[in-house]
Image: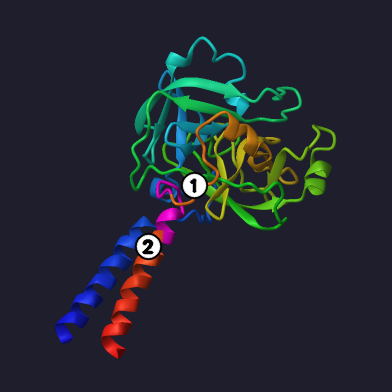
Amino acid sequence: MSEYIVSVVYLALLGLNLCSGALLNVTLDTRIVGGEAVDIKSHPYQVSLQYSNQHFCGGALVTRNTVLTAAHCFGTSYASMTSSYVVKFGSNTTYGTGIQIDSVLVHPSYSSELLDSDIALIRLKSNVTISNSVALIRISELSSYSPGSYASVTGWGYERENGTISDVLRGANVPLTSESECQKSYANVINITKNMICAGYSKGGKDACQGDSGGPLVQKNKLIGVVSFGAGCARAGFPGVYTNVGQFMDWVVDNSNYNRNNSADTAYVGAAQTNCASFLLGILTVMYCILFA
């Protein structure tokens, strides 16, 4: 009996160790502007968009060959130059594995003047290889969120306004702001629509910045926004503005191979956590049967 107990306990500890490595946490308590580095293994969906090997925007892997980003990262200038664009991933720096871009689809309603519908889909020429530093993220289907709740934003953008691109991935936890409060902040600047989410501290200090554009805003292991615009970086009274990706779910599904119903795919952030929990529950059940049956 004792050897069975030892074996099962060993399996439980091994499973706990494996699962702890597979859990893809997205919690952050630092900041992009003047913040600390974060690990790509905690944000494996984050990618760097590069032109001629220079980082210019961020993005999020939503399928093995699809990246979601901001439309303003490309505008209309990309059409004849896709061969110069590369998506890099799987590294804390911008020197990760690269795959060439096959095509870019900017949302048809995108307005560079109004900054509305600021969303685009990138199709890669080949699939990414899933690992502990490369994974996909599901898109939230919600269209509104609780003001005051927190979400995380990551990227290689400027560490301060008018600064330089960061050498390593950085991130921040930022509180979501109501649409009405955000509209007050930008009343004399631009109209805040339901296609936007605002997040940031009223006193400033934590925010996305230049170079973070298109990067992911994540809450509860789901992509809720992509970095769109702001008044400077981390300025008091001006929250960052993000594209509300839940408003564009149908467009994403219609124009990519994203499967909104495939919840079992372990390539997605959060799926590994569920599978590990089931594995550990099974081991504990066996232990109970051996000890008390």
On screen, residue 110 versus residue 73, left or right, reads: right
The quarter of the picture where the N terminus appears is bottom left
Q: Position of residue 143 (x, y in %)?
A: 70, 46
Query: For the residue carrying disc 1, how many other residues have a C-alpha within 10 Å: few (<14), some (14-19), or many (20+)?
Result: few
Residue ID for mark 1 = 262
Q: Position of residue 229 (x, y in %)?
A: 67, 34
On screen, residue 293 versus residue 168, left or right, reads: left
Task: Name the amino acid type tagged 1.
Answer: Asn
The quarter of the picture where the C terminus appears is bottom left
Predominant SS along the magenta part: loop
Q: Earlier in the sequence, mark 2 or mark 1?
A: 1
Q: Is residue 267 magenta?
A: yes
Residue 228 or residue 234, whichever sits in front: 228
Residue 85 in the image: above or below residue 140: above
Q: Position of residue 90 (x, y in %)?
A: 37, 39
Q: Residue furthest front?
A: 293
- Give the alpha-carbon distance from disc 2 to disc 1, as whole Å: 18 Å
Q: How is the image coloured?
A: rainbow
Q: Is residue 264 magenta?
A: no
Query: For the residue carrying disc 2, how many other residues have a C-alpha within 10 Å: few (<14), some (14-19), or many (20+)?
Result: some
Q: Residue furthest bottom?
A: 292
Residue 275 in the image: above or below residue 180: below
Task: Name the amino acid type tagged 2.
Answer: Cys
Magenta stretch in the rendered image: 265-274
What residue is drawn where x is 22% and y is 73%? 10
Can residue 212 be seen here? The reply is yes
Residue 118, quarter of the rendered image: top right
What residue is drawn where x is 32% and y is 67%? 16
On screen, residue 176 versus residue 282, left or right, reads: right
Residue ID for mark 2 = 276
Frontmost of labels 2 and 1 is 1
